[in-house]
Image (cartoon, grey):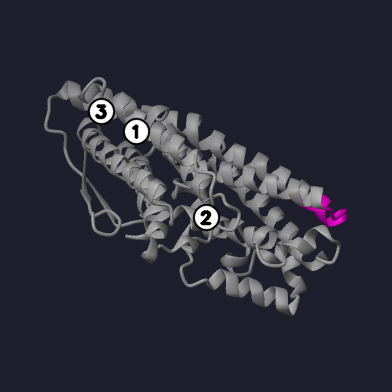
Amino acid sequence: MRPSVRLVLAFAPLLCGNVSITQAEADHAGIARSSLAEMIRPGYSALAEASATLKGKVESLCAKPSTAALRDATDAFAATVAAWSKVEILRFGPVIEDHRYERLFFWPDPKGLGLRQLQDVLAKRDTTVTEPDQLAGKSVALQGLPALEVLLYGDGAETLSKGDGAFRCSFALSIAINVERIAKSVIEGWREGSAYAKAFVGPAPGDPYYHAPKEVTLELFKAFTTGIELVRDQKLGKPLGASPAEAKPKLAAFWRSGLSFQNAAGNLEGVRALFAQGGFAQVVAQESAGVENSILFDLDHAVEVLRGIDQPMADVVKDEDLRAKIEALRVGLKGAAQTAGDMISRGAGLAFGFNAMDGD
């Protein structure tokens, strides 16, 4: 397991009778199976499908540049970001092997390392980046969705529709091919009978990934809790800042494409799927019936608010009404995370130390 934030998880024995222990152990296996079948595999399949469409649209753009073709490519990019957003919270499994996660999504990048590397490639017209096999061995900052966003939406993107952006388009196509290949490799890593899938649903002491069912629950629990914090603190809190004067909208993911809030909403939809379809809702319901519905309400409300924001982050951070709405949303998410975390840890027999992102 590889934590993405300062979240420390530790085992703790269940201080209850044998019947409760048996129930909890059965729940661990069910949570693993449900999460894999209902959230993990469908999520990566959707990403692979969207990235295949993206590759085709960028290929068409390069073959016949036009305003319409560029619009088709950016629409396909938005669909791929939407698919990625729902599995972005999963920082375990095949996606972390061979640096696949970073190759797909090199973010955050507060110092602009990726942009500088990309600008250097464009200035020098380094043709090796137009070969997907060679691109896969280069800096992760050049390979994934943030780099492709710069090419499709950043300075000079208009050349893609006019026919004088051939190198830029070939680079974009190489990235799109790379993204599709990575998505397919993750699917292969989760396929029925793969080493990781076997360990996930049937861990054993000698396995290299998980040694007991509770470890899998801990992994999923980490994705749930850090997924909420990712949105609350990184996706929203840091760009917003303490005031409009302190806002840093360019710290937001996908700010160039205007997809920052859609990305955050997709993250929360992934969190919701883990909770509702992966089995954590049932754990909470057994602890206190009805509370699971309150948590789902908070998550659904947050998604609704984020999807309703159609302004770019740079405008939102200056709007006091929207800032207040987002701050209220962040408070609700914090409460939902704490309530769910407490009940899941008790109901599933977990104990965790919580030193969440920056100051909580």
Closer to the eye: label 1 or 3: 1
The quarter of the displayed image where residue 343 is located: top left
Picture disc at residue 201: none
Please provide percent x and percent y for residue 214.
30, 38
**Residue corresponding to mark 1:** 298
Of 186 and 71, nearer the camera is: 71
- Decide whether the magenta segment is chiefly helix, strand or loop: helix
| Disc 1 residue type (three-letter) | Asp
Q: Which residue is drawn at 31% across and 31% down?
A: 295
Q: Which residue is drawn at 35% across and 42% down?
A: 329
| Disc 3 residue type (three-letter) | Ala
**Residue corresponding to mark 2:** 101
**Residue corresponding to mark 3:** 24
Q: Considering only vertical position in the picture, is 345 above or below 113?
A: above
The magenta stretch spans which residues? 58-66
Q: How far apart are marks 1 and 3 (CA)?
A: 26 Å
275 falls in the magenta region: no
Which quadrant is home to the C terminus? bottom left
Q: How far apart are marks 1 and 2 (CA)?
A: 28 Å
The quarter of the displayed image where residue 277 is located: top left
Element carrying mark 3: helix
Q: Considering only vertical position in the picture, is 20 above or below 82?
A: above
Give the mark nearer the N terminus: 1 vs 2. 2
User: 10 Å neighbourhood of mark 3: few (<14), some, or many (≥20)?
Assistant: some
Look at the image and tell me whether residue 192 can be seen: no
User: 10 Å neighbourhood of mark 1: few (<14), some, or many (≥20)?
Assistant: some
3 with respect to 64 (left or right): left
